[in-house]
Image (cartoon, rainbow, N blue to C red):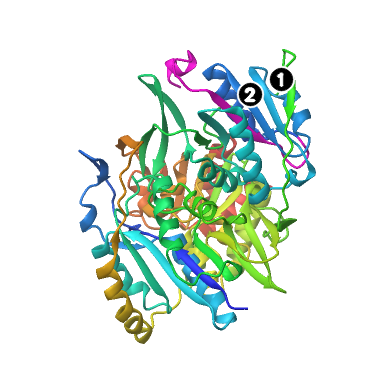
Amino acid sequence: MPYQIIVCGGIAPDPLQTLEPAMGPAGPALKNEMMLPAVFDPWAAHALYEAAHLARQFPGSSIRVVTLAPKAKLQQVMMTVAQKLPFELIPIDGPGGGFTDAVEVSKVLAQAISAIPGIDMSQFLLFGGWESATRGSGCVIPMVAARLGIEDCFLAVDELKIEDGALVIKERVEGGLLQVSRCSAPPAALAWATGSLPEPPNHPQTGMANMRAMMPALQRAKPAGLTGEGFSVPQATLPAQQRQTQVVKDKPAAEISRELLEWIKG
Amino acid sequence: MDQRLMQGKHMEKILVLLHTEADGSLGRAARECLSLAASLGKYDLAISGADASAAANSAEGSAERILCIAADEFAVPRSSTDSAAAEMLIRTSGATLVLAPGTSRWSRALPMAAARLGGVIDTHAVGLEVVGDSIQVKRWFYRQRIEGTVARSGSPWIVVIEPGAFTATEATPRQATIETQSLELAVSPRTTVEGTISTAAGEQTIRPDAALLFVAGAGWTKKQKDGQVHFADAADRIQTFVHKSKCSLGSSKSLVDLSSEGEAVLPFLTHLHQVGQTGSTPRHRKGLATCCHGEEPHVVGWRFINERRAVNLDPNCGWARGKADVLYVADAFEVMKELNALLD
């Protein structure tokens, strides 16, 4: 059976960048936010790779990526992501930072997905990252699922297998364990953790084919219209945590180990 | 905690929403949530799951009203049943502010309940404070790199409390005789929970309650002084230390990624061990990093590790730049061999 997979994912500042909040009239933002290099959100990227893996196993499956992000920035990010696998991009133009309301974002995403023609709920899988690297709330995918009428939602998913049409899912739970669940059939929502798939290599031909459809889609991207009503972030600061590191050189391993043992037991 | 919170100077009608564990008890995160609620003043208590009524009797005694859903369908963690139970309990209580522990079970179900209730939700709350007559929630943004406060006007407002952020009370039976109101809810779940498995080979290597976090970085898989890689020695030293010290084992993204890219690495390390921006942010009193460079995306996962030491051959690595208390510039293979011998 083919699947209609929709992956929700945003963009995030490159993890190696230094982030600094700056308060503005509309609340906090990142200093030089539009100048920071961005990447596709890491856990959402894993969701996308898992979607591609599933689609390859079930011919006829489709992958669409619904993204809420500033479209100029999104276009830059897609130059790389589009080379990984074939998919259709459904962009929504709006702020992609962490200081937005997850509740409002989930409404916008659910509206965008509802407007896609030809969605068959018996084949529908909603994918996304467990938590974004920006807001990190971990509640957008479950809320989108609820708004679309999906009752079976799985969080921090590391594995999906299809067995006789049923979805067998492993989710991270407390204590380093994985909970194994069996959902009889789609629709279902899966918010992915890291999974087990490597990042696919770049494939320039796929990228060019993707970008031919993505560029017009980006130009037509509708504004998200986030109002932030009833939500504010009055304060955002960097944690004042800088340690005075003592760098110990030229000490024999035996002495270091004795010192470490004392510290561990202390 | 904000002093005005403790004096109850806010306008919220509070519900503490808990679930029972598999054995019918209340977990540590639930008791932390109860402790927080007790400091706020009056609240209602709602519990879902196996033996919910019995758990309510063992709960801390400040609740004014108790609601329970305890049918068999609600005994296992599952989004469809848990979100339906949470929705009904919140709706019945009429609460404007819902405090719930940030367990995997509620993290999955409560956003769904919030969406259906037309409410709002904030997760990973590590503090509450009163501004005027309203409450603001403290939480982290950008994966523990920026801390901020969130204010809301919508209701019901579900606040999911980060485990470990507040002190847990010891279970004390309730004092007053309050009738427990049991609610009936018909559900027909399409998902069956088959159980839990551990990915650790041989022995459990992730110990959330351990005092020490031991992180193995990618350096363990690199060529050593003799120009060779020593996977077997690395695995032996790491596993021996974990076994003897009973610490929790973590890793860096670069090391676990090597495994998924098909390279020969340390087979007992999986993405579940990954600490950092795309991994976990564990809470341990002490942390020891070995063969790890201490780059920012990894170190954000150390936000809640109080005392930090690192062993690395690079004196200019990230740990040296204010991220560790002590950096030993040394060969971790030798140090861990000596340390393991001392632990005998």
Residue B183 vertical position relative to residue B131 in the rendered view, above or below = below
Callout 2 environment at 10 Å: few (<14), some (14 to 19), or many (20+)? some
Residue A162 sits in which quadrant? bottom right
Distance CA(mark 2)–CA(mark 1) = 8 Å
Q: Give, as a three-letter code, the residue at label 2.
A: Thr
Residue B293 appears anywhere in the view = no
Residue sitting nearer the eye, A40 or B44: B44
x and y, in percent, of residue B135 in the image: 42, 25
Q: Quadrant of the N terminus of chain A?
A: bottom right
Does residue B128 show up magenta in the picture?
Answer: no
Does residue B19 show up magenta in the picture?
Answer: yes
Magenta highlight range = B1-24
The total of numbered circles placed on residues is 2
Dots 2, 1 in contact, CB < 8 A: yes
Q: Give the numbered dot on residue B172.
A: 1
Q: Give, as a three-letter code, the residue at label 1.
A: Thr
- Residue furthest bottom in the image: A205
> What residue is shown with label 2?
B169
Callout 2: helix, strand or loop?
loop
Q: Residue at x 54, y 52 (%)?
A: A146
Residue A228 in the figure: left or right of residue B123 = left
x and y, in percent, of residue B312 in the image: 43, 55
